[in-house]
Image (tube, coloured by chain):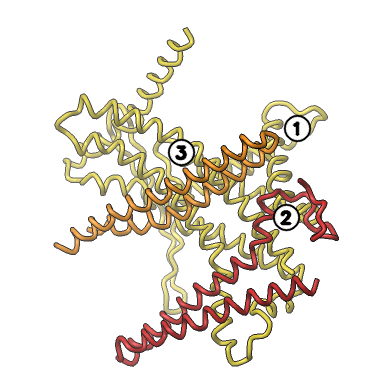
Chain colours: A orange, B yellow, C red
């Protein structure tokens, strides 16, 4: 019983921490992208494309952690 | 006046979402005597199953078709090739693409119009933005057919999963692993084409390593080769599954908080509609990311010297 | 922005986007770091299964982890030196 409770607790904490990492990382990415576009508006298209790609890669890494949390949370 | 039209459109969308998703969920719980726990019902909607199910949203009647079993014994093991829900939707996506794209491509007029124009702009996008910009102009045309296939197939499977009562075929790790294995095979092919069949495998281990370390280095380097397709598979699978899980759990909040339905329902529906629109964007984005990373890995492998 | 590059005299990277060019330049080093991770993982797994087979837990696991780290770092340094040597030779 206590293992089940600890598994659920671990899943919740893990998901929260993973999202903190992703949010911080993607926030910094967006900040530098906006600064880059502000400095050189002519490169806006390429900066925007690279930003989307990098954001998707960071989210992919976060979803690794999320898959582990879901595996913990659906123990029953 | 414009704002008024927009709010009534939003209200209509929210009502449609309610009818199509909430009522069946409640009807399901009611028809099973309320014995189904909410997480089990949600997980049942997201994972693969041996049955195809449809619910009549008005009356709550549920129709469930058991899919045929195709099992046969080979040697000592039982091979099970029975179709499941995700496989049926893969077939539907493939049939849609084959029939639709063949019909569209047949009308090759000088000035394109209608659906042909849409397909042509997507194909041009994949060829110019994804293939040429990641593989380089000289080799891109060789790999464009595979990239187009991957892009359209993944896009169709993702979008089909957003239709009510359907299943997302890319929400199955086997499907995404198969697609990632195809990209991996093309990566090996591109590497062998540029460095020679023997040269490619001989250059996996860095030069200057003494021969007695080869049994250690070869598995290490092979593992390093496999991480890229592994990440491709997990990224697509987790994005699709996570999106649908969030959507279902937001709607399941209505059943998890049964004391205040008047407050919970509109909030839950609003969030669910928002997440639904985000899922449409994620469907396109994940197809684009998979194709772009495939092109990138093929390009890196074709020029690795 | 496109391809007038002294480091790429035969214009192999014509038509590439900036992102693709950056990934292609970084690729040997990323491959080397995966060798480091893979070496450690291989050592730990080998040590763990040798432990289960021979029953000497946890010493073989520790030995496998140390050997794995050594092999991983060796592979990483060798791969990076190889890349540098190949770039200098060109």
Q: Residue at x 46, y 41 (%)?
A: B161
Please determine whether, in this image, residue B247 is positioned above or below residue B7: below
Please say if A56 is above or below B100: below
To which residue does mark 2 refer?
B135
Depth check, mark 3 against mark 1: the one in front is 3
Spatial CA span between label 1 and label 2? 30 Å
- Which chain does the residue under circle 3 lie in? B
Q: Quadrant of the C terminus of chain C?
A: bottom right
Q: Nearer the viewer, residue C9 or B84?
A: C9
Chain ID at mark 1? B
Which residue extends farthest top?
B1
Whether residue B143 is situated above or below residue C63 in the rendered picture: above
Give the Cα distance between marks 3 and 2.
29 Å
Residue at 33 percent across and 89 percent down: it is: C59
Circle 3 SS class: helix
Residue B200 at what x, y percent from top left? Answer: 71, 74
Other residues around mark 3 within 10 Å, as few (<14) / some (14–19) / many (≥20): many
Mark 2 closeness class: few <14, some 14–19, many ≥20 residues within 10 Å: many
| C27 or B79: nearer the viewer | C27
Q: Note whether residue A39 is visible.
A: yes
Q: Earlier in the sequence, mark 1 or mark 2?
A: 1
Q: Nearer the viewer, mark 1 or mark 2?
A: 2
Going 43% across and 47% down the picture, which residue do you hit? Answer: A24
**Tag 2, which secondary structure?**
helix
Circles 1 and 2: CB distance less than 8 Å? Answer: no
List the residue tagged with mark 1: B107
- Disc 1, SS: loop
Query: Which numbered marker is on residue B279?
Result: 3
């Amino acid at each position: 019983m206590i293992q089940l409770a600890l598994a659920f607790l671990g899943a919740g904490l893990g998901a929260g921490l993973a999202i903190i990492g992703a949010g911080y990382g993607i926030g910094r990415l967006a900040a530098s992208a906006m600064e880059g576009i502000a400095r050189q508006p002519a490169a806006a298209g390429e900066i925007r494309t690279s930003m989307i790609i990098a954001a998707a890669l960071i989210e992919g890494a976060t979803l690794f952690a999320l898959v582990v949390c879901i595996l913990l949370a659906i123990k029953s | 006046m414009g704002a008024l039209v927009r709010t009534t459109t939003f209200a209509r969308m929210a009502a449609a979402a309610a009818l199509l998703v909430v009522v069946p969920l409640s009807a399901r719980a009611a028809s099973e005597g309320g014995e189904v726990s909410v997480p089990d019902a949600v997980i049942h909607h997201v994972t693969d199953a041996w049955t195809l199910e449809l619910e009549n949203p008005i009356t709550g009647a549920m129709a469930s078709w058991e899919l045929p079993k195709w099992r046969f014994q080979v040697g000592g093991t039982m091979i099970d090739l029975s179709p499941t829900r995700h496989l049926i939707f893969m077939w539907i996506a493939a049939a849609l693409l084959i029939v639709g794209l063949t019909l569209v491509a047949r009308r090759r007029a000088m000035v394109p119009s209608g659906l042909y124009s849409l397909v042509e702009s997507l194909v041009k996008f994949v060829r110019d933005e994804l293939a040429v910009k990641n593989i380089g102009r000289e080799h891109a045309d060789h790999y464009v057919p595979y990239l187009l296939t991957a892009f359209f197939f993944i896009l169709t499977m993702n979008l089909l999963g957003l239709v009510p009562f359907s299943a997302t075929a890319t929400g199955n790790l086997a499907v995404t692993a198969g697609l990632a294995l195809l990209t991996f095979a093309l990566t090996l092919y591109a590497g062998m084409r540029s460095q020679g069949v023997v040269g490619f495998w001989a250059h996996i281990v860095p030069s200057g390593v003494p021969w007695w370390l080869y049994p250690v280095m070869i598995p290490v380097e092979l593992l390093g080769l496999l991480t890229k397709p592994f990440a491709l598979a997990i990224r697509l699978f987790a994005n699709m599954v996570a999106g649908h899980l969030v959507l279902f759990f937001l709607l399941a909040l209505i059943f998890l908080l049964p004391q205040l339905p008047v407050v919970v329902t509109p909030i839950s529906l609003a969030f669910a509609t928002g997440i639904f629109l985000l899922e449409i964007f994620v469907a396109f984005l994940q197809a684009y990311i998979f194709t772009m990373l495939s092109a990138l890995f093929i390009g890196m492998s074709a020029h690795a010297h | 922005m496109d391809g007038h590059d002294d480091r790429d005299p035969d214009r192999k990277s014509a038509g590439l986007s900036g992102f693709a060019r950056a990934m292609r330049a970084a690729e040997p080093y990323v491959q080397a770091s995966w060798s480091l991770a893979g070496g450690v993982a291989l050592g730990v797994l080998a040590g763990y299964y040798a432990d289960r087979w021979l029953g000497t837990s946890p010493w073989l696991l520790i030995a496998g982890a140390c050997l794995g780290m050594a092999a991983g770092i060796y592979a990483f340094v060798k791969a990076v030196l190889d890349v540098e040597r190949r770039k200098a030779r060109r």
